[in-house]
Amino acid sequence: MKPKNSKFISILIIFSFSITSFGFPQFFTYIINQTSLSSMDNTFEEWRDVILNHNSIKTETLIDLQQETISNLYEQIHIYQDWDNGIYSANEKNQLLLSNSHTPRIRYLGPDNHPIEGYDLISHDDEKFELNFRLDDRILNEWVVRVYAYLDYDLYDTFMSNSEKFEDGSTYKHFQPGEQPVFQDLNPDTSFMGIEFDKILEDHDQWTTSEKDYVAKKNYPGRIDQELYFHVKVLYKKDIYESNGWHSYYFYINFYISWYWTSSFQHRTLNIRDDDLGAPVISNINIIDAPIYDSYNEIIFEINAEDKSGISELYIEFLGDKYFDNDNDNLISIPNPSAPGDYTLSISAVDADSDREGDQLVSTVYSNLNILDDDITAPQIIIDENEFGWNVSILDNDGIIDSESSGNYTLIDQYGQIIDSGIIYQEETIYSISKELISLMKPVSLSLRVFATNNDCEWEGDEETSEATREISITLEDCYNYVIAQIEKLKNYIKENLQSCVKNFFIKKLNFTQFNLRSAYNQVIQGNICCALHNLKTALSRIRMIKSIFLCFCHKFCCCDFDLDYVIFTLNEIRNNIVLLKGNSVDYEKNTDLGYQIASIEVKVLNLKDFIQENISYFYSRCLRSVVMHTTILIEKALFRIAQDTDYTRVLTCAQWTLDLAKCKVNYLLGKEKISQNLADVLIEKMTQIQNEIELVK
C-alpha cells in the first residue's frame, strides 16, 4: 500500500521532470491546458483560482510569476487536493503547509546596493550607522507583516536561543477566519537582545509584493564599539485554507549578518568608529592693539581654531570666568583686570563632534598676558611768582596715555588759617593766585601748598601724586604796589571811556595819588612814619574828591559806554586799601598789630557812610553822614597817636560817643518817617558792631 503522500511525491517528480524536459514556459502551458486532473470535490483549476484570488493574482498574469512561486503554487494545490480526496487529514495538511522550508529571505546590501559579500563594513562611524538589506518571499499565501532591525551591543548572535519567539514564549500565533490580532499579540520578543541594544528600524506595513528594500539607519548611534551585532527580525504570516475559511499563522524569523559574510572576512561583526578622533587645533593667538595698558576697558583676542567636525565652542577662561566667542568670528573679549603684571589664561576649543555623549573633544592651550601701567610718573608742579601773586601749573605728558592730571592748592597763613584755596582742573594751564585775596592787604607769612594727581586710577594704588610747598610772604611793599596797580588799572579805563576834555584831569589827580603812595612807602622805610601818614591822608583826600566829582557831574562828561558803578566801586576799594596801608605802615614802624586793627575799623566806618549815602536821600542824610565822617577822623587820629607813641584810647572813646550821636540821628529820621524801621535797625546794628570792635582794640 502506498503512503498517503505518495501521490504528492509522484507529482513533484513529474513536475521536476516536465520542467527539465519542456522548459518552464512550455510546462506552464501544458498545466493550464490539462483538465483531466480532478479531485472528488474541487478541480485543480478551482484550487488554483482560490489560491490566486487569495493572493490577489489574476489568472492571466500567472505566466509572469517566477518559477519558484509557480512551483510553490502547484505544490500547495496538490496538498489541498490530497486533503480533498482524503489522503491527508486536516492536521497533516496543515503540517505539510507549515513545515516546508519556504520562509522570507534576506539579502544584505553593501555600497551601491551590491551584495554584502566581498565588502568589509567596518567603516560605520558614530555620526551615522546605515545598512541596506532586501527581503523577499516567493511563496504564495505568505506575507511579511512587520520588520524590525536592531543594533546589539551585548550578546553574540550565535547565542540567540529565544530570537524566534513571541512575548509570551510561543513559537507561533494562530487566528481563526475573520479574527484580527491586536497589537500586543504580535509584539516581538526582545529578551534575547540582553540589555544593550537599539531598535533602529520598525515597519508595520504588510507586504503586497514579493520583495522590499529596507534601510536600517541610526543617526548618532550613541556609542562606539569594536564588536557590534546587527539583527533583522521579521514577522510573517502563512494563511491555510480550512473548511470554514482561511486561517492565519504568525511566525518570527531572525537574520544575523554574520551568516551572510564570506569566510575571508577577519571581522564577523560590525564596527562603529569615532568619526573624529582628533581634538581641535588652536593656533595664531593674537592680541588686538597690543601691548595692553591698564587703561584699556577690554582685551580682544583673535584666535584661530580648526577641527574636522567644526568648532562648537571657543572660549577663554580667565580669573575664574569663561568668555565665549558668541559671534563665531574668532574674536573673544575679556575685561581688563587693570592691575599691571603677568597673567595666565587658558584658551579652549570644543569640536562639533557631538554624535554621542562624551564624543566631543576639547583642546586647551595656555597663554601669558602682560598688562602695563600707562603712566608711572607723578605730575610736575610749577610755581612761579609774579608782581601781584603766583602762577601755578601742572605738567604730566610723560605717560603712554594721557589721563589729564589735575590738582588743588591751599594758601595758609602763619596761624594755620586757610586764606585761599582752589582747584586746578587742567594740566599745562596757568592758574593765578592773586595777592589781592590775601588777608585784606595785610603783610603776612604764608604757605602755598599744591597737590597734583595724574588721575591714573585704573586700579588701587595706580595713582601717582605730587605735592609742593612754597613759603611766601606778603610784604608792606607788596601792599603798596598792589594799590598803585589798582590806580593804574583805573587810569587806563578812564583813558578809554571818558571824553578828552575831562579825562586828563582825573588822570592827573590819580597820578598825584600814586606819587603820594610811593612817597609814603619810602618815608616808612626811612622811619618817618608821621610823614608817611600825611602822604596817605593826602592820597585819601584825592580819592574822595575824584569820587565826589564823578557822582555830581558824571552825566555831563561820561559817554554811554562808561560804567559809573565800576568806577565808584574801584574808588571805594582803593580808598579802603589806602586806609589799610596806614595801619600796616604803623605796624611796620611800631612792630604791633594795633594799626591794622584800627584801620580795619575805619574801613568799616567808611563803608557805613557809603551804605547811608546809597539808602537815604542826600538831603536827609547830610547830618548823619557828617557825624559818621567825624568818626573816621577820630579813628584816623588814633593811628597818628600810635605813631607818636601817645595815648590813642581817648580818641577811640570819642569815636564811640560819636557813633552814639549817629544812632540818635537814625532814630530822629525814623521818628520823622524818613527811613524805615528795617533800615534803622540795620544802621544801628552796624554802628553797635563798630563800637564793640573799638572797645576790643582799647
Image (cartoon, rainbow, N blue to C red):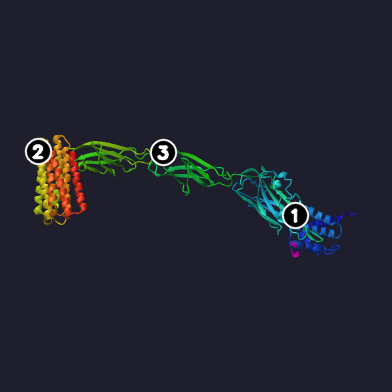
Compare marks 2 and 3 and give the one earlier in the sequence: 3
Spatial CA span between label 2 and label 3: 76 Å
Spatial CA span between label 3 and label 1: 77 Å
Question: Label 3 neighbourhood size at 10 Å, few (<14), some (14-19), many (20+)?
Answer: some
Residue topped by disc 1? 250
Residue topped by disc 2? 530
Q: Is residue 78 above or below residue 335?
A: below
Give the tally of numbered discs.
Answer: 3
Q: Residue at x 53, y 42 (%)?
A: 362
Compare marks 1 and 2 and give the one earlier in the sequence: 1
Compare marks 3 and 1 and give the one earlier in the sequence: 1
The residues colored magenta run 58-63
Residue that extends furthest to the top in the rendered view of this protein = 591
Percent x, y of residue 176: 78, 58
Identify residue type, mark 1: Tyr
Are discs 3 and 1 less than 8 Å apart at CB? no
Identify residue type, mark 2: Cys
